[in-house]
Amino acid sequence: MPGGRLTQQERQQIALGLADGLAYAEIARRLDRPTSTITREVMRNGGPAGYRADLAHRATERRAHQRRQTAPRGPEAPPQAHGRDPEAVRAYEETFTAVLMQSGLPKMTARVLVALYTTDAGSLTASELVRSLQVSPASVSKAVAFLENQGLLRREREEGRRERYFADDDVWYQSMIAAARSNTLLVETARQGVGILGPGSPAAARLENIARFMDFVAESLARAAEQAREILHPKAETAPDEASGPSPERGQPAAGPGARAGEPK
């Protein structure tokens, strides 16, 4: 399997494959490249609908030039923990970011989440995120606020005004519970429409089917979340406000982190 950067000819083949509606895996197979390489290439250069081979090639050359200008040289280069290959780590972070973007997260939000997931410290401050991602404090603040609202991040205040952000092992459980509370309103609103539109009408039947589907799937997800938490993280403590939250026994709906309503693009 060939390595190294994609050539301009390969990028043209990617553009043709996207135009033909081919999946990333099929394009990767035809180019004898990893699927993750194609996914990362497309997502960082406009996505499936906006990918242009010539623009992607120029953008890649520009990024490479910028990295050469800013990268530490010689003995000043910081050592990588655990003997990691810095290029492999960077490529993995880009792939992970692309996958999260495909699930619906905005790019900067996905980058912040990946930075938190891949740090050995288990947490980062706003200033550390700004330095690591080379973005503005305002961009980090907006991404952190969105992740916290979705239950994908928690924050703790340190001495002074500095805050530290965490994406720990229990974060996906917390996110599912947060989504459960938001989905409760959707189910209640759908069933309210049944009475307003008239039981027996096609519109009312459609809304009732939505409510039943959400109830059924949500209850299964809630049970699975509880079971996974008990098995994978048996020492996790239940927060006080969770006790009054939705539970499978009461039939409250829940959804995973991918089911977020109204998140920004």
Image (tube, rainbow, N blue to C red):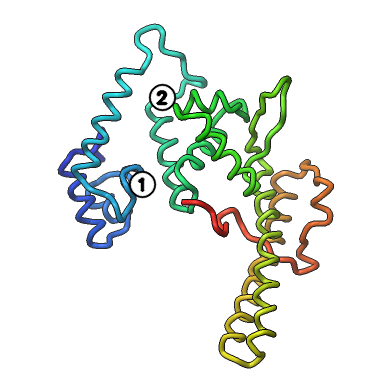
Relative depth, front residue between 102 and 6:
102
**Mark 2 Cα shell of 10 Å, populated few (<14), some (14-19), many (≥20):** few
- Amino acid type at circle 2 is Pro
Quadrant of residue 146 within the rendered picture:
top right
Instruction: Identify which residue is drawn at 32% across, 44% down.
Output: 34
* Residue receiving disc 2: 86
Relative depth, front residue between 90 and 144:
144
- SS for dot 2: helix
> How far across and how far down the image is residue 83, in percent?
47, 20
- Asked if residue 250 is positioned above or below residue 232 in the image, the reply reads below
- Asked if residue 141 is positioned above or below residue 241 in the image, the reply reads above
> How far across and how far down the image is residue 57, in percent?
22, 38
- Asked if residue 27 is positioned above or below residue 201 in the image, the reply reads above
Q: Quadrant of the N terminus?
A: top left
Q: Could you tell which of marks 1 and 2 lies nearer the N-terminus? A: 1
> How far across and how far down the image is residue 233, in percent?
72, 44
- SS for dot 1: helix
Left or right of residue 137, residue 252 in this image: right
Instruction: Identify which residue is drawn at 38% across, 13% down.
Output: 72
Relative depth, front residue between 186 and 27:
186
Q: Nearer the viewer, mark 1 or mark 2?
A: 1
Residue furthest left in the image:
9
Instruction: Identify which residue is drawn at 66% across, 83% down.
Output: 194
Q: Which mark is residue 65?
A: none
Q: State the separation of the CA atoms marked 1 and 2.
A: 21 Å
Left or right of residue 79, residue 39 in this image: left
- Tell me how many marks there are: 2
> How far across and how far down the image is residue 103, in percent?
48, 53
Left or right of residue 206, residue 253 in this image: right
* Residue receiving disc 1: 43
- Amino acid type at circle 1 is Met
Instruction: Identify which residue is drawn at 69% across, 78% down.
Output: 192
